[in-house]
Amino acid sequence: MDASSVKKGIKKISGIMTENKDYLIKLDQQNGDGDLGVSMSEGFAAAARFVEETQETDLGKLLMQTGGVFNEAAPSSLGTIISFAFMGMAKSLKGKTETDPAGFAEAVMAGVEKIMAKAGSKPGEKTILDSIYPAAQSLLEHRDCSFEESFRAAAKAAAEGSEATREMKSVHGRAAYYGEKSIGILDGGSVVGKLIFEALSE
């Protein structure tokens, strides 16, 4: 994996967010403010434009800069949270121009841990962590496999984690106001996490 791989990945994620924009809006309207589909599609579109134009080859710098562009274009709580993941991954890959499945797995987990530290949240609280934490764990478990195999397994883990949020009660953000009423509803943030790994597996 190198800078060109990151560009392909961000472009693929941007495409899947655009395709699912209306779906994410509908999901978010159930217990949020309905801006999820807009912020994710616009944020990743801006990130895709940036990586296409930059000549940066240092993976750490590339991810840090991309995270900044994404956050600026997606001014929402989830936009900020995802920018934390970019920061964590950037620190893990600082100074590297390429990495293998093991190095990428460590970077993804570093990104997830940065979210938990900055946002004060953990898996099981009906957030994006419920899809991306199991995906990160899966990547670590498949660190000796090919990227293709490890991404496929991570996408499956993310999808299962997202589906599990139906049975959870929201404890963060606007959704927390709905309390018990949030049970039975799929968490929009977890779906964003699922879509990210779905895009990478494709």
Image (cartoon, rainbow, N blue to C red):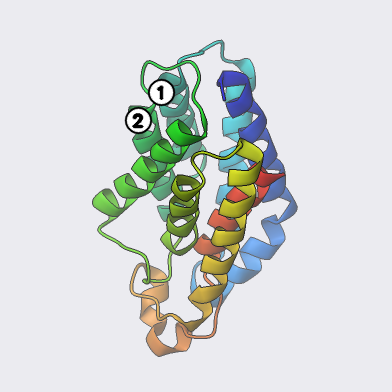
Determine the residue positioned at 36% across, 76% down: 176
Relative to residue 83, is residue 15 drawn left or right?
right
Determine the residue positioned at 50% across, 54% down: 135
Numbered disc 2: secondary structure: helix
Relative to residue 51, is residue 117 drawn left or right?
left
Q: Quadrant of the N terminus?
A: top right
In which quarter of the view is residue 36 placed?
bottom right
Q: Alpha carbon of mark 1 to alpha carbon of mark 2: how far? A: 7 Å
Provide residue 12's location: percent of width, then percent of height: 69, 38
The residue tagged 2 is 92
Determine the residue positioned at 57% across, 49% down: 40
Type of the residue with mark 1: Gly
Q: Earlier in the sequence, mark 1 or mark 2?
A: 1
Numbered disc 1: secondary structure: helix
Disc 1 vs disc 2: which is toward the camera?
2
Type of the residue with mark 2: Ser
Provide residue 121's location: percent of width, then percent of height: 29, 61
Which residue occupies the extreme front position in the image?
Answer: 144
Q: Is there a contact, CB below 8 Å, between mark 1 and mark 2?
A: yes
* Res 60 label: 1
Front position in the image: 119 or 59: 59
**Residue density around tag 1, few if under 14, some if 14–19, many if 20 or more, within 10 Å:** many
Provide residue 157's location: percent of width, then percent of height: 55, 60
- Residue 128 position (above or below residue 113): below
In which quarter of the view is residue 2 placed?
top right
